[in-house]
Amino acid sequence: MYRPLRPRRPTPVIPNASASASATLRRPARPNETLPPATLPRRLRRPRLVIAGCGDVGLRLIRQLAPRLGSRARLIGLARGTEALAAIRAAGGTPIAFDLDERRPRRRLGSIASGWIHLAPTPAEGRRETRLRRVLAQMNRRRRLPCGQPVASAAPPRIVYASTTGVYGDSGGAWIDETRTPTPASDRSRRRLDAERCLRSAVRQGIQRAAVLRVPGIYAADRLPTGRLQRGLPALRDEDDGYSNHIHAEDLARLAWIALHRASSGRVYNAVDATELKMGDWFDLVADTTGLPRPQRLSRADAKALVSPMLWSFMSESRRIRAHRIGRELRARLRYPDVLDGLLEVPAPSVST
């Protein structure tokens, strides 16, 4: 029996639906969109850690990371001297000759770094940290991919800046933490504070991600004040002496790496150990460990007349610093929580007969 064909139902038309879909499919990529990571060469997809001022602590950090990361990341050390560049390569990093004092650097490393650890010293004079200011200016320029396409949506590299506990000034031996208002007494500490304020201002504006480590006196088995003891420089007598603070170089290198990944942006952390020791007692301890004579103890007036102004700026300040944030927020445990732990690695002095 013949059955007539039913008429085909018309397809419902949704206004602007197909037009918008086709337009979405045909829309060319905007110039400021980031290309997918897979489209970049493999060497540019690897994280790149730049260590500015790659001296003793930077080399220790490279030696810690190179065996763990292997080819998964590129460790770049910036230095100026030929010997320093050779040491970076021997430690397992990629050395690059770079002058932070150059006004117009030939290499724009800030635009290719995934992370930036700033261990470089401040300029020798002035109250402004011009070196870090140049780095920040370079990072905040318009970034581009190798093909020339701008990357407006790419986040700037995270920065860890090694400042100094000297920004606190003299607290008279009182216990202080990161909430204390900085009152630096020397231009060197003022330059560090200027760098901190530059970073925190950039963080508040949303153009930078950064954290600050306030670093005290750095020591290690091969980094002790033996030269001072050999020169016979005095220390203050106990009633005039002030408290000093310390951190082992290996612990500082590890803290810089941990802060790069765990620190809150704009946060300040005291990178100090739990030692509670006066400066003269510290020198006595080093002298006994290395077999050198203990320093002579003098009054403040007599000691000030014998030491340089820079050395006196260290001797005249006294503060005891708490470092709860590195444990609570960074979840870091120091390998050398006390200077006695670090001095155990110093070889025993040879006894002449």
Image (cartoon, rainbow, N blue to C red):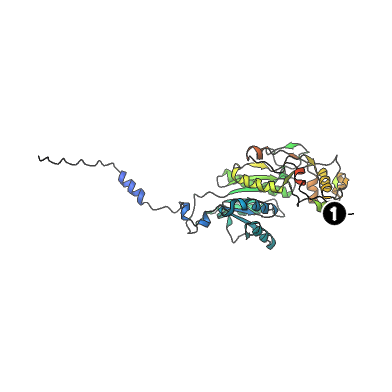
Residue occupying the point 81% across, 53% down: 227
| Three-letter amino acid code at the position of disc 1 | Arg
Residue occupying the point 66% across, 40% down: 326
Q: Position of residue 267 (x, y in %)?
A: 62, 41
132 or 117: nearer the eye? 117
Q: Residue furthest right?
A: 353
Residue 163 visible in the picture: no
Residue 288 visible in the picture: yes
190 or 95: nearer the eye? 95
The quadrant of the image that shows the C terminus is bottom right
318 or 49: nearer the eye? 49
201 or 60: nearer the eye? 60
Q: Is 3 drawn above or below residue 60 in the view shown? A: above
Element type at mark 1:
helix
Q: Position of residue 279 (x, y in %)?
A: 80, 44
Q: Position of residue 126 (x, y in %)?
A: 71, 53
The quadrant of the image that shows the N terminus is top left
- The quarter holding residue 13 reads top left
Q: Residue furthest bottom?
A: 82
Left or right for 184, reference 227? left
Q: Is 334 drawn above or below residue 308 in the view shown? A: above
Left or right for 260, reference 247? left
Left or right for 176, reference 263? right
How many dots with numbers? 1
Q: Position of residue 247 (x, y in %)?
A: 72, 45
Q: Residues within 10 Å of mark 1 (few under 14, many from 20)?
A: few
Residue occupying the point 61% across, 56% down: 76
Q: Which residue is mark 1?
A: 231
